[in-house]
Structures are given as C-alpha cells and as structure tokens.
Image (tube, helix red, strand yellow):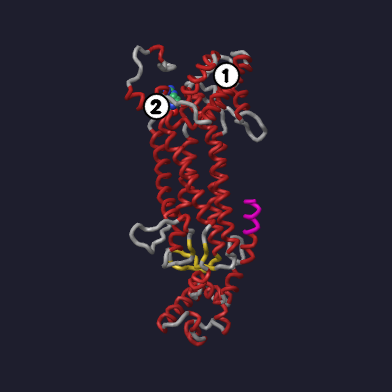
C-alpha cells in the first residue's frame, strides 16, 4: 500500500475518485529524464555542502540511473496513487536505497516541477528549432528546383504582380526563421535554475544554488550560473509556459498560411502544384478526388495551438501568489502544443519534399500583361510624369483595353497616346517579363540577381 509522502498529518488517504482526479503522472511521466537529472544535481549539491555523505549521493545516483534505465526500457510501473512523476520516482528510489529518504532535503515539488519544466523547455525549443530548419531545407530544395518559374503574386487573392515562385517560397523561410528566433528566446528565458526556492521561501539549510545551477547547465554564455532571484516568483511563475505556447501558436499561424497557399495552388482553379499522394487522401465516395488533407489538418491544428495558449493565459490570470494546484493543468496544453507543432513541421517538410510544380500552368497564369500595369506606370514616371498622374493614365489604358476586348499590350501607340502624350513607341517594352523582373533589383525584391543572393544566404544559413 502506497503511503503518500505527505501522509503524516492525515488520518485517511484520498478517495479513489480524488486520486483519479488529482493524478498527473499520466501526462507528466514524460518529465522523468529531467526529473532524474534534477534529482542527481540536487543530491550532488547536498553532498557538496555536506548535508549528505558522498556514499549517500552515490547510492542515490546509482538508484536514479537504474530507475531511468527501467523507464527507458518501458519496464517502470507508473502508479496513479502516487500522484505525479516526482513521487513515483522518489518512491521507487526509496525501495532501492535507504539514502532516498534524504533526497528531498531542502527541496519542494514546487521548485522541482519548475526545474523539470525549464529543462524540458530548453530541450523542446532545440528540438523544434531543428525541425524548423528541416522544413526550411525542404522548401529551399523546391525553390532550387524551380528557379525560373514565375507565378502571379496575390493581394486580396487577386493577381497583383509577377514574382518568382522562389521569392514566394523564400517568404516562408523568413517566417520560419522568425519562429526559430522565438524558440531561441523562450529557451533563454527558461535558462534560470529554480531549485533552492523550495515550496515558497527557500530553506533554512545551507545549500549552494549556484552549484546546482551549474550542474544542470543553467549557465550564461560565459558559463556563470543563472539562478532565479525571488523564491516566491519562481514557484508561481508560468511565463515561459505562455511564451512557449505563443511561439508554437505563431508557428502554427505561419504553417496554416502556407498550408492555405498550397491548398489553393493544388486546386483545379490554380493548378500550380501537385502535392504528393503520400500526403493526400481520397474520397470514400468520389473516385476522382485527391484531397490535400495534410495541409487542411495543419490549418486545423493551428486552431488547437491557439487554444492551448489561451488555456495557459486563463489558467494563470486569477491565481494569487504563489503555487496553486491549478498550475498542474499547465502541462497538458504545453505538451500538446509541442507535439502538434513538431508533427505539423514534419508533415510540412514531407509535403514540400514531394511537391511537383506545374510550370506550364504557372506560366499561363503569369502571362497576363495586366500584371505589369504598375511597371507601365513606372515607365511613365521615368518619362517625368508624376506617379499619381501616371497611375491614372495607366488605369485609363486598362479600361480602354477592356472596352476593346484586347490584352493590354495589344493596344496601338495612338490608342495609348490618346490617353497620355508621354507614352512613346517603347511603351510595350514594359510588358517584357524578363526585363520587368530584372528591374526589381533592390534588396528584398524578386529580381534574378536578388534571388541568387537570397539563395546563397539561405544555403549558408541552412547548411
Ligand atoms: N504535480 C504537481 C504539478 O504539476 C507538482 C507540484 C505539486 N505541488 C504541490 N504543492 N502539491 O503542479
């Protein structure tokens, strides 16, 4: 019969219903490697300051290593009646080594769980950053394979101006790069060691917080230990949870917007790309259907990521300092955000890796000379016409072409000169797509020369 570690002042154990209600081991067991790392560092510190002997430390370490091996082998028996990952591991250690009874000296589950989570956040951010880079590499490969493909760029989902497909894809790389930057910031914010804060007010025992922090890798760039500076804030603070969920939600918004582009591009109406069979599904009724379910699910899961962020904000907002058991509910949304973001990034990378670009459909879509109406206005500007006048003079030409039922570049010189005298014989050169692209030569613009620069930059960045 399991004896709750806090059972001393109780004459009755928790009801079965209460046990099921209050347990968290069903989801926090995944913290085990971090919990064990924290306990090893804590016991090393206790030995360092003489609160336990070196033999006791070694016995604790040996026991914890054996427990971790059992967990990794799937042989550890998690018990819900022991509430959470912390008590499960401590209890298992107690059964192995007598020194286990000293492990919780100068420690509370409140600073323990804060430590476990901060270690988890650092690992999770590194993992998601690596997955972001994988997705970026898949996108870069598609851009590299289709360097000469032009498509219409859209505003208001109306054809606006021609862009290289690669320029559009590089926009995705920028979005994902900012996401990676956010995860790096979250990891940095997690990089402060809570241990030593105790339940709320530290401990009367002479511990060495800096020793523990160093042992666990909570250090700055110069290797100096980083320990949290207020024990009450430390056990109450859930900022990093919110920031992590926000970084996942923002990544989710980006992935959702990319997914929406691909869904549109794969439709018969656009027909710019074909997504791989391996990331599409069929219809149970309509034999001809091939649906971009992977992208639709990414769009759907981004809603879930936003919900998780909202859960965490609401969870924290009304709580008095410091720890309240409500905070146990912080973990499911955080873990879910991590798991779903990781999945979405993998699926996006896989879908891009198998994507085929339909060059002929893209070329047809970008062939309308009206997409270069802005270039024609710029032509008039080069003739000395003020832009507002030029804009109007091109608009009138567009209207004229519409009335005559011809493409913009099929109007005659006298047609356009009837609108504005600044049009010269070379006015039609504005519709030369290759020249038009070459003119977009500034930083951040889609000229071939700029694209080559961006290719080089991303290849280096993602190497
Ligand atoms: N399982 C708890 C949680 O996740 C650990 C901290 C429990 N602390 C306490 N005072 N009951 O929040």
Relative depth, front residue between 200 and 383: 200
Callout 2: CB less than 8 Å from ligand 1: no
Determine the image quadrant of residue 82. Answer: top left
Residue 457 visible in the current orientation: yes
Q: From what the image shows, is residue 313 above or below residue 35?
A: below
Residue at the image point whose x is 50% and y is 31% from the top: 74
Circle 1 SS class: helix
Res 229 visible: no
Disc 2 residue crowd, few under 14, some 14–19, many 20+, Cα 10 Å: some
Q: Position of residue 347 (x, y in %)?
A: 49, 50
Q: From the image, tell me which residue sits under label 1.
A: 60
In this view, 281 is above or below 434 = above
SS majority, magenta: helix
Q: Is residue 103 above or below residue 220?
A: above
Residue at (46% x, 75% y) in the render: 392
**Assess mark 1: CB under 8 A from ligand 1?**
no
As for residue 412 lying within the magenta part, the answer is no
Write down the region rendered in magenta: 454-463
Question: At which x and y percent is residue 379?
Answer: 56, 75
**Residue 79 x/y as whole percent:** 42, 24
The quadrant where ligand 1 appears is top left
Q: Nearer the viewer, residue 86 or 252?
A: 86
Residue at image location 41% in from the left, 60% down from the top: 290
Place of residue 19 in the rendered image (x, y in percent of width and height, measured from the top left): 36, 24
Q: Is residue 462 magenta?
A: yes
Counting labels gives 2
Residue placed furthest toward the right: 222
Q: Are marks 1 and 2 in contact (CB under 8 Å)?
A: no
Considering only order in the chain, which callout, 2 or 1, is on the residue closer to the N terminus? 2
Q: Residues within 10 Å of mark 1 (few under 14, many from 20)?
A: many
Kindly indicate the quadrant of the structure image that contains residue 62: top right
- Residue annotated with mark 2: 23
């Amino acid at each position: 019969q399991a004896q709750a570690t806090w059972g001393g002042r109780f004459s009755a154990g928790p009801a079965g219903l209460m046990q099921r209600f209050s347990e968290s081991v069903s989801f926090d067991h995944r913290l085990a490697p971090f919990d064990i790392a924290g306990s090893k560092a804590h016991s090393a510190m206790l030995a360092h300051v003489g609160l336990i002997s070196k033999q006791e430390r070694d016995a604790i370490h040996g026991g914890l290593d054996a427990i971790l091996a059992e967990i990794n082998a799937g042989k550890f028996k998690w018990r819900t009646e022991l509430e959470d990952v912390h008590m499960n591991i401590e209890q298992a250690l107690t059964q192995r080594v007598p020194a286990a009874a000293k492990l919780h000296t100068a420690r509370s589950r409140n600073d323990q769980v804060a430590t476990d989570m901060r270690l988890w956040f650092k690992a999770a951010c590194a993992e998601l950053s690596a997955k972001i880079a994988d997705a970026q590499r898949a996108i870069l490969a598609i851009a590299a394979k289709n360097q000469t493909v032009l498509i219409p760029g859209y505003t208001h989902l109306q054809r606006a101006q021609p862009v290289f497909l690669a320029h559009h894809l590089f926009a995705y790389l920028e979005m994902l790069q900012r996401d990676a930057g956010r995860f790096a910031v979250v990891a940095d914010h997690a990089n402060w060691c809570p241990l030593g804060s105790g339940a709320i007010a530290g401990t009367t025992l002479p511990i060495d917080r800096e020793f523990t922090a160093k042992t666990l890798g909570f250090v700055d760039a110069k290797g100096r230990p980083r320990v949290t500076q207020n024990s009450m804030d430390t056990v109450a603070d859930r900022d990093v949870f919110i920031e992590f969920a926000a970084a996942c939600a923002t990544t989710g918004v980006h992935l959702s917007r990319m997914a929406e582009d691909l869904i549109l591009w794969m439709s018969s109406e656009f027909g710019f790309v074909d997504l791989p069979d391996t990331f599409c599904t069929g219809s149970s009724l309509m034999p001809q259907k091939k649906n971009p379910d992977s992208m639709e699910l990414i769009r759907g899961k981004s809603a879930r990521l936003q919900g998780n962020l909202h859960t965490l904000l609401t969870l924290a907002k009304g709580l008095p300092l410091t720890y309240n058991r409500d905070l146990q509910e912080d973990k499911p949304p955080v873990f879910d955000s991590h798991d779903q973001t990781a999945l979405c990034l993998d699926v996006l990378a896989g879908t891009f890796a198998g994507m085929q670009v339909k060059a002929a459909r893209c070329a047809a879509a970008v062939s309308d000379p009206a997409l270069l109406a802005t270039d024609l206005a710029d032509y008039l500007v080069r003739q000395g016409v003020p832009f507002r006048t030029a804009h109007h003079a091109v608009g009138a030409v567009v209207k004229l072409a519409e009335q005559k039922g011809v493409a913009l570049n099929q109007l005659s010189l006298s047609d356009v000169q009837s609108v504005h005298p600044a049009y010269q014989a070379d006015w039609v050169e504005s519709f030369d797509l290759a020249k038009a692209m070459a003119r977009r030569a500034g930083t951040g613009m889609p000229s071939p020369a700029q694209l080559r620069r961006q290719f080089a930059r991303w290849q280096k960045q993602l190497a």
